[in-house]
Image (cartoon, helix red, strand yellow):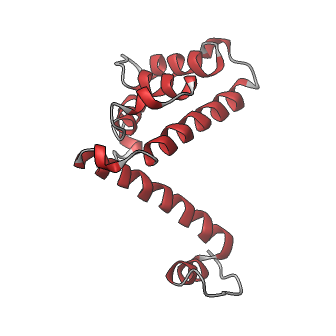
Amino acid sequence: MVPNAAETSLRELTAHWAQCFPTSLGLSIGDGHAKGLLTRLGLTYNTDEQLLDSLSSLLVGKSIRRWDDGTVAQFERELETAIGRIEDKALQTDLSVLGESAVDSLAALVCGRMQMMYDQLVRLVGRKRADAMMAAPDAPTRGNDEP
C-alpha cells in the first residue's frame, strides 16, 4: 500500500519506494548514481533535510545550501534518470528469483506507471476517447472530448 503523500514524510515515502526492490538489485546496477540512490534510501536519516542533502551531494555534488538557480533542474534531471534506471533494472529482473513480496511490489510499481500514462492520455485526448483506446487499442478513434 502506498502511503498518503500529504500525511507522510519524505523519508517514509522514499523508504517505501526503495522497499519495492529486492535487496540484490543494488548489486546488479552499474550506474553509480542509481546504485548510490538505492543505497542512501536504505539508510536512516533524522530529518527530511538530511535525506535531501545526502541525495543532493550524490546527484549534483553539492549540498542544498550551495545550490544556485540551475541546480534544481539538474537535481531533478539526475534524480529522474537514477529512478528510471532503478525501476527499469528491477522490471528486467528474472521473476523466478524473486519472492512473492518483491513481485507484488514490482506489480504495484507497474500499476503506478500505468496510471500515470493513462492520466497523460486523458489529458491528451479526453477521458471518453482514452477509455475507448484502452478498451480496444487497435481500433481507430477520432475526435477529442473534454478531459
Q: Residue at x 50, y 82 (%)?
A: 135
Asked if one can make out residue 94 in the rendered structure from this viewpoint, the answer is yes
Q: Residue at x 53, y 80 (%)?
A: 131
Query: Image height check: is 107 above or below 123?
Result: above
Image quadrant where residue 6 sits? top left
Residue 112's x, y, as percent?
Answer: 45, 55
Q: Which quadrant: the C terminus?
A: bottom right
User: How many numbered marks have been drawn onto this rendered protein structure?
Assistant: 0
Residue 96's x, y, as percent?
Answer: 30, 49
Residue 132's x, y, as percent?
Answer: 55, 84
Q: Residue at x 41, y 51 (%)?
A: 109
Query: Image height check: is 55 above or below 88?
Result: above
Q: Residue at x 29, y 52 (%)?
A: 104
Q: Choose between 139 and 12: the one closer to the eye.
A: 139
Q: Is residue 73 left or right of residue 27?
A: right
Asked if one can make out residue 1 in the rendered structure from this viewpoint, the answer is no
Q: Is residue 13 left or right of residue 61?
A: left
Residue 5's x, y, as percent?
Answer: 41, 43
Image quadrant where residue 11 sits? top left
Q: Choose between 95 and 118: the one closer to the eye.
A: 95
Q: Is residue 25 left or right of residue 78?
A: left
Q: Choose between 131 and 85: the one closer to the eye.
A: 85
Query: Image height check: is 26 above or below 86?
Result: above
Extreme-left residue of the structure: 100
Q: Is residue 57 left or right of residue 16?
A: right
